[in-house]
């Protein structure tokens, strides 16, 4: 039977490449914590962008897609879902909003995990929402020739409640151990969750929501401003390969977590690196104003108004912003939406 125990993180020698990533992450986290205090407007705007990308990216990994325009409308609650895919997208949005706004008050518990799952699927798939699987499931692989094979057998349905109980208890025990680094612990917990595969549907999306919650509770909130899910989506081939490698011999407690840990840390590092780059672009006095305005608009997946741009770039006059907007419209880089005070702009796809 599988045992859930993360004490090896206290004793095992950490590979040098992981130490380098951890060092970089901690350094960039410190810089961005200071920036958040000094430039709240910039981070507020980045958060608006990131939540759209998170909802889009996490669902896209599972093949659940709609247009960018519909994603924006659903995320901003300006339109009700029109089909099954959009119902799934709206469910993810609801859980993500809860985690973003209330993570300090949320415990990592079976009750909360089941509640998140119920919220995510209560409209799209109410018959399985908030319930552990009742039938055994498998992870299937489709070969290039179209034939199929079983890549991984998760925990049996009958053993799932006990496995989830043990997973949570092992996490709590390790979380409270000052000698275990939280950034090494989190991906191990997520790998075990994915190997248990406790639900008949939604395990991947739940794993990403739990990843964000665990990161936020550990004090790492880059995912609020640069979508962690979108970073996974960009390199999902590497993500799935790391998951495959770390799940080999999982059922006999012989698996190597560090493939998945490395992918997790690389993804988080990329979030901080992108956040650092985006902040530098919109806030740097060394980069000319036109470039900063263009970067602010082109990096936004939401329609953005002149007032939004002015809030992000308070040192640039509205007149200069208007000049750049008109230039970008003429060059066909952006599209104008609405009229008058409600006018907004978005990059042309």
Image (spheres, rainbow, N blue to C red):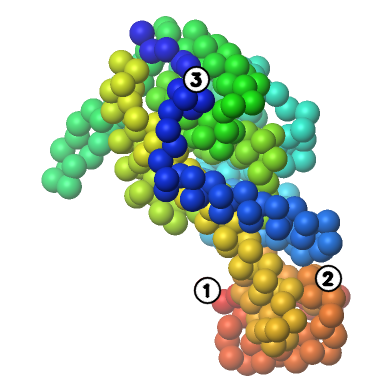
Please tell me whether residue 249 is drawn above or below residue 54 in the rendered image. above
Q: Could you tell me residue 7's position as x and y percent?
A: 50, 20
Q: What's the residue at 79%, 75% (across, down)?
A: 313
Cα distance between the residues tagged 2 and 1: 25 Å
Q: Residue at x 68, y 84 (%)?
A: 287
User: Which label's residue is closer to the chain start, 2 or 1?
Assistant: 2
- Secondary structure, mark 3, is loop
> Dot 2, crowdedness within 10 Å: few (<14), some or many (≥20)?
some
Question: Disc 2 or disc 1, which is closer to the eye?
Answer: 2
Rendered image: mark on residue 235? none
Which element is circle 2 on?
helix
Residue nearer the viewer, 175 or 103: 175
Q: Which quadrant of the view contains residue 83?
A: top right
**Residue at left offset 71%, top offset 74%:** 282
User: What residue lies at 57% left-to-right and 33% top-to-bottom?
Assistant: 181
Mark identifier at residue 7: 3
Residue 21 sits above or below residue 259 on the image: below
Q: CA distance from mark 1 to mark 3?
A: 49 Å
Distance (Cα) linking label 2 and label 3: 47 Å
Please state which of the two labelled residues, at mark 1 or mark 3, is closer to the viewer. Answer: 3
Q: Which mark is residue 349?
A: 1
Task: Classify 10 Å Cα crowding around label 1: few (below 14), some (14-19), many (20 and above).
Answer: few
Residue 311, numbered label? 2
Q: Quadrant of the N terminus?
A: top left
In primary-sequence order, the first of circles 2 and 3 is 3
């Amino acid at each position: 039977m599988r045992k859930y125990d993360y004490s090896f993180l206290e004793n095992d020698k950490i590979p040098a490449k992981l130490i380098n990533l951890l060092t970089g992450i901690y350094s960039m986290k410190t810089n961005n914590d200071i920036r958040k205090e000094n430039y709240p407007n910039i981070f507020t705007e980045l958060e608006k962008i990131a939540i759209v990308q998170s909802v889009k990216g996490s669902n896209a990994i599972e093949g659940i897609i709609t247009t960018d325009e519909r994603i924006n409308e659903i995320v901003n609650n300006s339109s009700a879902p029109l089909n099954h895919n959009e119902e799934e997208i709206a469910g993810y949005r609801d859980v993500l909003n809860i985690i973003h706004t209330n993570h300090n008050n949320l415990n990592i518990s079976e009750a909360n995990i089941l509640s998140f799952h119920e919220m995510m699927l209560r409209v799209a798939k109410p018959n399985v929402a908030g319930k552990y699987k009742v039938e055994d499931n498998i992870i299937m692989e489709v070969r290039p020739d179209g034939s199929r094979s079983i890549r991984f057998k998760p925990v049996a349905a009958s053993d799932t409640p006990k496995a989830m109980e043990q997973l949570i208890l092992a996490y709590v025990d390790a979380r409270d151990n000052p000698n275990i680094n939280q950034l090494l612990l989190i991906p191990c917990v997520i790998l075990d969750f994915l190997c248990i595969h406790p639900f008949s549907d939604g395990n991947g999306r739940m794993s990403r929501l739990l990843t964000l919650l665990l990161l936020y509770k550990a004090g790492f909130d880059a995912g609020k401003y640069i979508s962690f899910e979108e970073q996974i989506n960009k390199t999902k081939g590497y993500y799935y390969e790391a998951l495959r490698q770390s799940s080999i011999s999982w059922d006999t407690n012989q698996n190597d977590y560090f493939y998945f840990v490395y992918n997790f840390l690389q993804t988080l590092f990329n979030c901080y690196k992108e956040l650092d780059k985006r902040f530098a672009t919109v806030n740097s006095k060394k980069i000319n104003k036109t470039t900063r305005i263009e970067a602010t608009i082109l990096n936004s997946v939401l329609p953005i108004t002149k007032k939004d741009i002015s809030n992000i770039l308070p040192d640039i006059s509205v007149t200069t912003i208007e000049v750049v907007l008109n230039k970008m419209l003429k060059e066909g880089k952006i599209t104008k939406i609405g009229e008058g005070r409600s006018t907004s702009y978005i990059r042309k796809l």
